Amino acid sequence: MSRRTRPSAASTVRIPRQRGGQPVILVLSPEPPTLTTRAAQAAGRWAWKHRRSWAPTAIATTLLVLTSAIHLIEPHTGWALAVLALAPAGVWAWGMLRRRPTSRQAAVWRALLAAFTTTAGAWIALAVGFGPAHPALLTAWAVLTLISQTGWLVARRLTVVTEKETR
């Protein structure tokens, strides 16, 4: 009397039918995950859990890729973007003339934000014109990314503390 046994690694997964009636195919590996797979999964879970904290770095990386593509397609667009790079400083100056902020801290944050966005806009214009792989522009990208990431984390921490104090 021989009993038929299923392999220990085999498993059955039941998935409800999807729209369109197409069957779902799920491939399960019978081998245990390797150390590399486990490390990649752990890094992926960590990145997903902290995705809001890393938003400036994701935006900076996207801008690096976009400026590369625009530079390859039409590098003369950098001249038009150079004019637009001055807009944040102009908006800040116009706002300071119309109505001054109530606190000194708000004025400092607004001035820093205007300076940073003007610098970032200038970087975008230069990267489109000369290519983001230029050593000086790549260094500027790294510094701007570091500044924006640090400022983002500081602002989030200050915001969280303020929200907790109001409860």
Image (cartoon, rainbow, N blue to C red):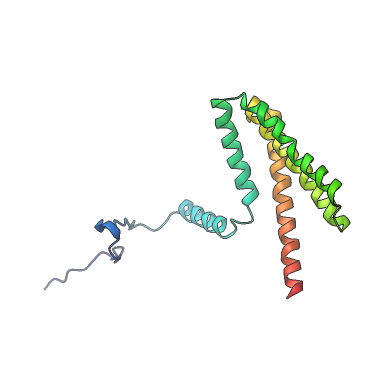
Residue 64 visible in this rendered orientation of the protein:
yes
Q: Residue at x 54, y 26 (%)?
A: 73
Seen as rendered, the residue at the extreme left is: 1
Q: Nearer the viewer, residue 35 or 56?
A: 56
**Taking 64 as reference, is 143 left or right?**
right
Q: Is residue 145 left or right of residue 66?
A: right
Residue 4 falls in image quadrant: bottom left
User: Horizontally, is 155 left or right of 6 in the view?
Assistant: right
For residue 101, what is the image quadrant?
bottom right
Q: Residue at x 62, y 23 (%)?
A: 76
Where is residue 123 drawn, in percent x and y?
70, 34
State the image coordinates of residue 107 (x, y, percent, origin top left): 85, 52
Look at 61% across and 39% down and name the residue there.
63
Q: Quadrant of the N terminus?
A: bottom left
Q: Quadrant of the C terminus?
A: bottom right
Location of residue 87 by image quarter: top right
Up/down of 156 relative to 108, above or below: below
Say which residue appears at 65% left-offset and 28% top-offset: 78
Foreground residue, 6 or 21? 21
Tally of numbered discs: 0
**In the image shown, does 118 or 144 lie closer to the viewer?**
118
